[in-house]
Amino acid sequence: MVGVSESAGTLAWTPGFAEWSFPAEAGAVRTARTLVRDTLREWGLDGVTDVTVLLVSELVTNSLRYASGPIGVRMYSHAGPTLLVEVSDPLPDLPRERVAGADDEGGRGLQLVALASRRWGTRPGTTGKTVWFELSLPG
């Protein structure tokens, strides 16, 4: 199993499935990147590691910016030729893609998710929401 920092809790981990919960703290993004990178390496999915880490980073950063409760990250690789990644938080408001101006410092995260992923979307939960994306696996 992948090592876990003190600021993250592993909720589940088996080959092809991993789930973590992070407190809404500044170190959550760094910890999420490390866990995602290490897990994908263990699963032999090095070909999608960089883009997955980038997109998880964007979504966890968005959750930190707007939500105050725990942030969940789930990854599934046994769903056929795709990797499904979900980032959840307790804020019920679904995010919307927006057009960022040339000088805007933010507003490009969901555009990046839309451009880099095979598919993506959002769904409300019983408490909060989930933003998900799929990546095609090599081979």
Image (spheres, rainbow, N blue to C red):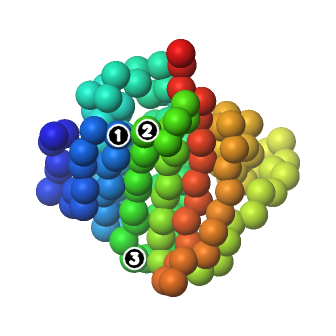
**Residue 92 against residue 98 in the figure, above or below:** below
Which residue is the extreme one toward the front?
80
Which residue is the extreme one toward the top?
139
Q: Nearer the viewer, mark 3 or mark 2?
A: 2
What residue do we see at 52% from left, 36% from top? 80
**Can residue 91 be seen by looking at this rendering?**
no
Q: Earlier in the sequence, mark 3 or mark 2?
A: 3
**Residue 82 against residue 27 in the figure, above or below:** above
- SS for tag 2? loop
Mark 3 touches mark 2? (CB < 8 Å): no
Q: How many marks?
A: 3
Mark 1 touches mark 2? (CB < 8 Å): yes
* Residue under numbered circle 2: 77
Q: Residues within 10 Å of mark 1 (few under 14, many from 20)?
A: some
- SS for tag 3? loop
Q: Amino acid at mark 2?
A: Ser
Q: Percent position (x, y) of residue 7?
A: 21, 59
136 left or right, relative to 75: right
Q: Amino acid at mark 1?
A: Gly
What residue do we see at 68% from left, 57% from top? 121
Quarter of the figure with the N terminus: top left
Residue 16, label in figure: 1
- SS for tag 1? loop
Q: Amino acid at mark 3?
A: Gly
- Between 80 and 134, which is closer to the camera in this rendering? 80
Q: CA distance from mark 1 to mark 3?
A: 27 Å
Q: Earlier in the sequence, mark 1 or mark 2?
A: 1
43 left or right, relative to 91: left
65 left or right, relative to 44: right
Q: Earlier in the sequence, mark 1 or mark 3?
A: 1
* Residue under numbered circle 3: 69
